[in-house]
Image (cartoon, rainbow, N blue to C red):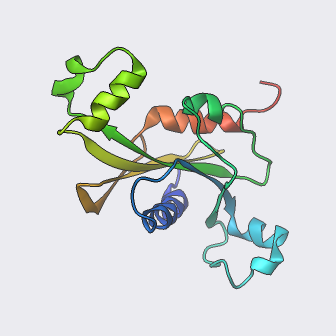
Amino acid sequence: MADTSRLIACLMDVERHVSSAGWDQPTRLFALVTTSTLLEVEPQLRGRVPETAPDALTAIEQDEFTATDNLFERLNSIFWPETVEGCAIALERAFLPPQFEADLPEDPDEAADFVAKHPNKTDVRVVVGVLRDGTKHGLARLVSDPDDLLGAEDLVPGLAEGLFDTFRSDES
């Protein structure tokens, strides 16, 4: 099993950064680069970026990223340069307990509206990250339980797969 500690540490930094702005935020995308590579390319950041372990990761927010209605289609349009070792995404979603699944309208827009207005909905922020080598991890924080940070390798497997796809080669 791959060592996920450096990815988890970076995702925790991303989650702290995103959480500092509160809830109701847009989807945010981050490139993950080794800190040593970042400081090699951008030496003026020395002293402003923490230098810990030699293979530590630094998250760089992609300010120009805007999620569309189809997040996976939007991710499919992204290609990273070789200096980017991984990527992470932070997004908020609302979900309902399984017993309300049968009540969901078929139309996606109507379903989203139904969930948003439902009194039993739960709001969650997830931060999912992947590395080129296949390492993946996800973190989640519920608005109803802000002191707990949940985490697992397969927390949001479909989203992790969508992030992996951003590392496909031009030939594939």
Is 47 displayed left or right of 89 in the figure? right
Residue drawn at (18%, 39%) of the image: 119
In this orientation, does residue 1 appear?
A: no
Is 103 displayed left or right of 26 in the figure? left
Where residue 95 appears, x then y in whole percent? 29, 36
Where residue 18 appears, x then y in whole percent? 48, 62
Q: Quadrant of the C terminus?
A: top right
Residue 103 sits in quarter: top left
Is 138 displayed left or right of 94 in the figure? right
Residue drawn at (69%, 59%) of the image: 33
In this orientation, does residue 65 appear?
A: yes
Q: Nearer the viewer, residue 18 or 23?
A: 23
Is 21 displayed left or right of 68 in the figure? left
Where residue 113 appears, x then y in whole percent? 34, 30
The relative height of residue 46 versus residue 132 in the rendered view (above or below) is below
Q: Nearer the viewer, residue 43 or 66?
A: 66
Where residue 150 appears, x then y in whole percent? 32, 54
Specify the farthest residue to the bottom: 47
Residue drawn at (78%, 32%) of the image: 169
The relative height of residue 93 versus residue 56 in the rendered view (above or below) is above
Residue 133 sits in quarter: top right
Residue drawn at (50%, 66%) of the image: 17
